Image: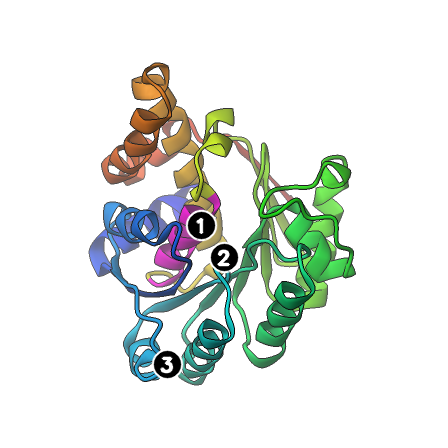
Amino acid sequence: MHNKLEQALTNVKTIHPLVHHLTNYVTVNDCANITLAIGGSPVMADAIEEVTDMASVANSVVINMGTLNERTVASMILAGKAANGKGTPVIFDPVGVGASVFRNEMALKILKEVKCSVIRGNASEIRFLVERHAATKGVDVASADTNIDVETLVKEGAKKLGCIVACTGAVDYISDGKQLVKIYNGHAMLSSITGTGCMCTSLIGTYCGANTDIFIATCAALLSMGMAGENAYTSSGHLGLGHYHMAIIDEISKLDATSLLERARYETNNS
């Protein structure tokens, strides 16, 4: 797996994939910058008049429903369908699903109308999509979901939802229903910065846009974020959250195929 992860980042740096984001207004700048930092090319277009054109030429499409309204959902579905028609990977971030009836309905509508390649969320978000159980605390993990069996959740979720499921937290879990990877890289300070989950999703979109192996691409993306979180803490964590925030982008920009794997901590479990 090491060699495949290494090649995944090399492909990003070589191909510079065009990543079409339909993302939220809180973290759009971070998502664009982290895409650039890893080697991708972001476009942040959500006007319904142009999303079909943009998605049709993109290497991947990222749908993030953080700041949700009916107009953006319509754009998301149009872009997703255009991507599906081209065989382009669609990465879905169901931010805050479980927190409101409207948000729940829109997430399920997107899943019904768009074939997703990867869904990334926290434990509460993934649990809602799999079990229709709502215990979300805004966009954060609800306390009731901190002790759930995430390994089983992502494996069963991947089977039920028909795509790769990535659940991020203190440990990241990625499954396609058969393969399971657990990633231990990361730092607790990541949870103190708004948008780090959105940035993870953008990294997944960038890796998926440059690689045919979507599972490996997803693993490489989350390893990248975990490594950046650790390295950013070492370089700037003692200076406070603002410096740490900027250092995450710095560290992503410095990643190469060798440094990505130097301190990679993960385990695999196939069934």
Which of the marked residues, 3 or 1, is nearer the chain's N terminus?
3
Dot 2 corresponds to which residue? 66
Of discs 1 and 2, which sits in the foreground? Answer: 2
Could you tell me the amino acid type at mark 3?
A: Ile
Near-viewer residue (114 or 244): 244
Near-viewer residue (104 or 259): 104
Could you tell me the amino acid type at mark 1?
A: Cys
| Main secondary structure along the magenta-highlighted residues | helix
Q: Secondary structure at mark 3?
A: loop
100, above or below 111, in the image: above
Q: Going by the image, does 101 lie left or right of 199?
A: right
Q: Picture coordinates of residue 180 (x, y %)?
A: 63, 48
| Image quarter of residue 78 | bottom left
Near-viewer residue (192 or 180): 192
Residue 198 image label: 1
**What distance separates the C-alpha of mark 3 from that of mark 2?**
18 Å
Which of the marked residues, 1 or 2, is nearer the chain's N terminus?
2
Residue 9 is one of the magenta-drawn residues: no
Residue found at x 60% / y 65%: 163
Of discs 3 and 1, which sits in the foreground? Answer: 3
Q: Picture coordinates of residue 124 (x, y %)?
A: 68, 48
Marks 1/2 in contact by CB < 8 Å: the verdict is: yes
Could you tell me the amino acid type at mark 2?
A: Gly
Dot 3 corresponds to which residue? 48
**What distance separates the C-alpha of mark 3 from that of mark 1?**
22 Å
Residue found at x 69% / y 65%: 101
| Image quarter of residue 256 | top left
Residue found at x 45% / y 72%: 72
Q: Which residues are magenta?
A: 197-209
Q: Going by the image, does 42 lie left or right of 131?
A: left
Q: Picture coordinates of residue 135 (x, y %)?
A: 74, 48
